[in-house]
Amino acid sequence: MSPEYIKEIVSNHKGELGALISILEDIQDRYHYLPEEALRIVAGETGRSLVDIYGVATFYKAFSLKPRGKHHISVCMGTACHVRSAPGIVDEFTLQLGLRPGETTQDGEFTLETVNCLGTCALGPIVLADGHYFSNVKRQDVKKILPKIKSGFVEEPGDREDRLFPVEVYCPHCNHSLMDEQNPIEDYPAISLGYSFNEMRGWVRMSSLYGSHCLESEHPIAADTTVKLFCPQCHAELVGKTACFDCGSPMVKLGFLGGGSLLMCTLWGCNNSEISLNGHHRRDEHTGESREHILG
Amino acid sequence: MVTLTINGLKVRVEEGMTILEAARFVGFPIPTLCHNDGLSPYGACRLCVVEIGQEPKSKLVSSCTYPVEEGLTVRTASQRVLKARGMIIELLLASCPQSKTIQDLASAHGVHQQRFKQEYEDCILCGLCVRTCSEQMMAHAIGFRGRGENRSIGTPFDISSDVCRLCGGCMYICPACQLRCTYNQPQHAICNACANLRPPCIEKEGYNNLMCYMEPCVACEIK
Ligand code: FES
Ligand code: FES
């Protein structure tokens, strides 16, 4: 844990009223838990008493004071999921991992937790693992889910179990749909865009399934190339104000049908994308980082 | 100035006072537990309930946190209030029977039974110690932690605090751990000893301090 990093987080939130929770969230994002030392630094930097901060940190279930594993599994035990046999799923995870809810494996890989409702009751039982939602989970699915979590969700194409929905996007400049019905990928209309890099121009079509990174492009593009993306209709360059939370490359902003926007990282192979449903990214102005991981 | 009616008596008090302050100012006693004159109101124990408003729409509020309003009607000892207060004391007894403060309250308010599952907590989460620590001692050494069932009071990380000056203020003010009551009927976890003395030690009316003035208590011999 680096004190400088904590101090930086605190200074990022300077002047915000009631920034404590945001600060703790940022620390938790980075370390997966709230180290004692970090809380002491936050207390020193913000001028609040340690006991206040500790009170907040222990009040919210989202914060953990114990180190959590690399992979964080939450099994929903809310009413709807419970009646659809979520307890059996917890038992199965317990069996497979040798953990009781709230514990972390010895090798620091997995933390198992139960939560009370993830807000998607109709799709229950729900398992949330590292930000990925698994819906309609059955007891026998647990064995299949675990390796996926372990491999960090690199998936084989065609394997669609944990994806929830296709998205539809439009160009924010000309409002034309970017969906290509003629050339579906994975049975859904593809998102079609123009790209340019190193004076090369071409087209790219990507799967519109949120969370899938299947795509076809005119030229082979090496990983770690930053590309410019264009609307195929009005040829305007797609831009965005934010930087990717994972790699720091600029993200482009597409209109999201039904309100909001979809942000996509322009670094080839980074595959990071985010949906902002209210059309407004909470932190744009402050840190240049977009942090609204709603799904994915 | 604000005019309000307390138990049928029209009174004029300063704006910004709480109902509790106003009622005490004009001489109506309201029992309190988590209230202390030197500390900010907190409203944790609800013992200070009073009834406000007109009959069918009247409601119970905690007087220690409710500011006076123009034209408010307050009843500090209506049937409804007494019933609620008795219930609160019973619940407090259910969690902390060993507290002399609570046992005294029970005797003074005629609570003779405790119908709930008996627990033996040593904290009723009234927050007096937390407020003493931060408001009077400016130490901020202890505070609330967790929530719901797991809420507790203590230092961060449960280790001895480096800002605590060991003043003992928290123990001094605590109504639950300061005096251990051994109550003479352990199966009922209710003492009532002073109320059963002849003549009774605590009189229901006219005795406003509630803590017994005799030390040690002649009935239960606690110092
Ligand atoms: S009960 Fe599981 S998502 Fe609501
Ligand atoms: S004295 Fe008013 S709620 Fe405790």
Image: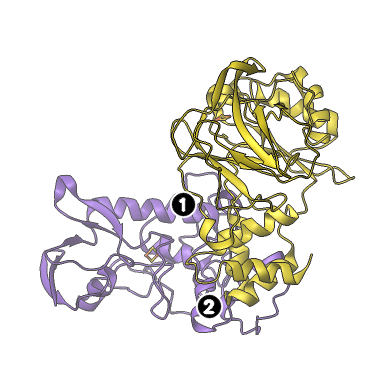
Indicate the amino acid at tag 2.
Ser
Q: Chain of mark 1?
A: B
Shade representing chain A: yellow
Q: Is residue B134 visible?
A: yes
Q: How many marks?
A: 2
The residue that label 2 is drawn on is B134
Residue A92 disc label: none
Q: Quadrant of residue A162?
A: top right
Q: Which chain is purple?
A: B
> What residue is rendered at 20% in x and 50% in y?
B58
Task: Establish if B57 lies above or below A215.
Answer: below
**Residue B86 appears at what percent x and percent y?**
37, 53
Task: Establish if B217 lies above or below A177.
Answer: below
Indicate the amino acid at tag 1.
Leu
**Residue A93 appears at what percent x and percent y?**
78, 29
The residue that label 1 is drawn on is B91
